[in-house]
Amino acid sequence: DVKVTQSSRYLVKRTGEKVFLECVQDMDHENMFWYRQDPGLGLRLIYFSYDVKMKEKGDIPEGYSVSREKKERFSLILESASTNQTSMYLCASRPGLAEGYNEQFFGPGTRLTVL
Amino acid sequence: AQSVAQPEDQVNVAEGNPLTVKCTYSVSGNPYLFWYVQYPNRGLQFLLKYITGDNLVKGSYGFEAEFNKSQTSFHLKKPSALVSDSALYFCAVISSGSARQLTFGSGTQLTVLP
């Protein structure tokens, strides 16, 4: 079974802190994604990566950056956390190159609270 | 542009009754359509997808969905609901051959009453 793990289930940070969210997948998938999930808004794509050292902006990249130095690991960085970044963050991976027809595999999520 | 609408925030159904969770979509070109389920405090799990071929798609846990091109819909169905089906359901779409990524709906909370 594909396993996608996220470094923390719950995280509490203060405004202005730099926050790192880590995601690791164990199935050699090329594609990895970071979403945030908010009630009534569904999932919104922050960033994605097709391959190592490659990244693309999603729909809401402002205030975030990412890093993919190894194929299995995709990190989301909040350079200076703000209260409006309080949310559930979901990481996902997907096999194949650009094929959109493969399903994504999701991690358990990190619930981030910024005070 | 591509978009997904899940018109119902909440669906309640009695155990043993059939259930339907609605989804309509908008894409340019042919769609790839997905249903995911999220149980409390968990990530999303893939249920089923439509890529091409038969309009009725069968997936995990007895769920199925019907692709209707003329109505641009992809409703999720199950003939007999279980209490354990209670969860948050997301529909998602991507246009085939597009460089864009999946677009998710806002989600529908399904509650199956015993």
Image: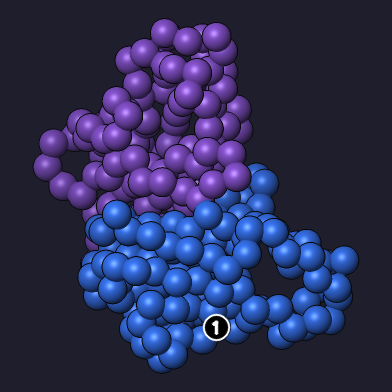
Chain colours: A blue, B purple
Q: Mark 1 — residue?
A: A66
Residue A26, horizontal then vertical, whole percent: 34, 69
Q: Viewed as shown, does residue A29 lie left or right of B42?
A: left
Q: Is residue A84 left or right of residue B62?
A: right
Chain bearing mark 1:
A
Q: Nearer the viewer, residue A61 or A93?
A: A93
Q: Where residue B82 sits in the image (x, y, percent)?
A: 44, 17
Q: Which amino acid does label 1 sit on?
A: Val
Q: Quick check: can you spot residue B9?
A: yes
- At numbered mark 1, what does the secondary structure look like: helix, strand or loop? strand
| Residue A64 seen | no
Give me the residue at 53% from left, 32% from top.
Answer: B87
Identify the residue at horizontal 36%, vertical 82% (top origin): A71
Residue B79, image x, y percentages: 33, 15
Looking at the rendering, which quadrant does residue A46 occupy?
bottom right
Residue at left offset 43%, top offset 37%: B23
Question: Which quadrant holds the N terminus of chain B?
Answer: bottom left
Above-or-below relation of A12 to A47: above
Left or right: residue A13 compared with residue B41: right
